[in-house]
Image (cartoon, rainbow, N blue to C red):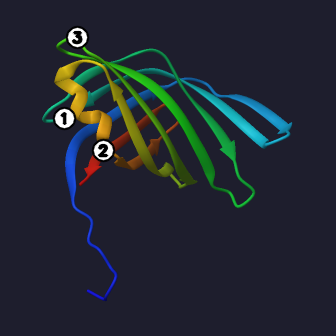
Amino acid sequence: MAEGQTTIAVEYLGRVSFEIGPRVLIENGPQGKRAIVPVMGGRFEGPKIQARLSLPAGDWITMRPDGSYKLDVRVTWITDDGAAILMTYNGIGHLTESGSSIRAAPLFEAGDPRYAWLNGIQAVGIGGRTGEAHVAYEIYAVL
C-alpha cells in the first residue's frame, strides 16, 4: 500500500429491499428534471436488525445531465421488537439494461437504546433497481 493510503473495513448490517410505486415527474424545474418515487413497502434483514418499512417513505430523485441521477431517500423502519429507526441517504444511480446500479450513503437515527449504536455509523449501500418496482441494497457500516 502506498504512503497515505488507507484500507476500509466494513461490517455487514443487512439487506434492504423496497417495493416502489409509480414515479411523478417534474420536467424543466429550476433544478432540472425530478422524479418523486413513493416507497410502498420493504424489509431490513440483518444479523442485528430485522424491520419492516413504515409509511410514508420516498425518494426525491434529481436527473443529471450526464445520465446519472442523485437520490434523496427518507424511510422509517419499525424493528420486529418495536423500535423506530429513521434511515436517510443520498446516492448516485446509473441506468443499466435491467434497471439501475446504485451506490448510497445511509445514516441512521434511533432513540431506542437497543439501536443507539446506529447513530454513530456511516454506512454504504451497494445495489440497485431491478425492473420497475424493486430496489435492494447490501448495507455495510464503515468501521
The x, y position of residue 81, in whole percent, is 17, 13
In the picture, the disc for residue 46 is 1
Q: CA distance from mark 2 to mark 1?
A: 9 Å
Indicate the quadrant where residue 85 lies: top left
Which residue bears the numbered disc 3?
82
The x, y position of residue 55, in whole percent, is 46, 13
Q: Is residue 125 above or below residue 81?
A: below
Q: Earlier in the sequence, mark 2 or mark 1?
A: 1
Q: Is residue 97 above or below residue 55?
A: below
Quadrant in which the N terminus appears: bottom left
Q: Are marks 2 and 1 in contact (CB under 8 Å)?
A: yes
In the picture, the disc for residue 88 is none
- SS of the residue at dot 2? strand
- SS of the residue at dot 3? loop
Mark 2 residue type: Ile
Q: Residues within 10 Å of mark 2 (few under 14, many from 20)?
A: many
Q: CA distance from mark 3 to mark 1?
A: 16 Å
The structure residue drawn at horizontal position 63% and vertical position 49%, both measured from the top left corner, is 69
Mark 1 residue type: Gly
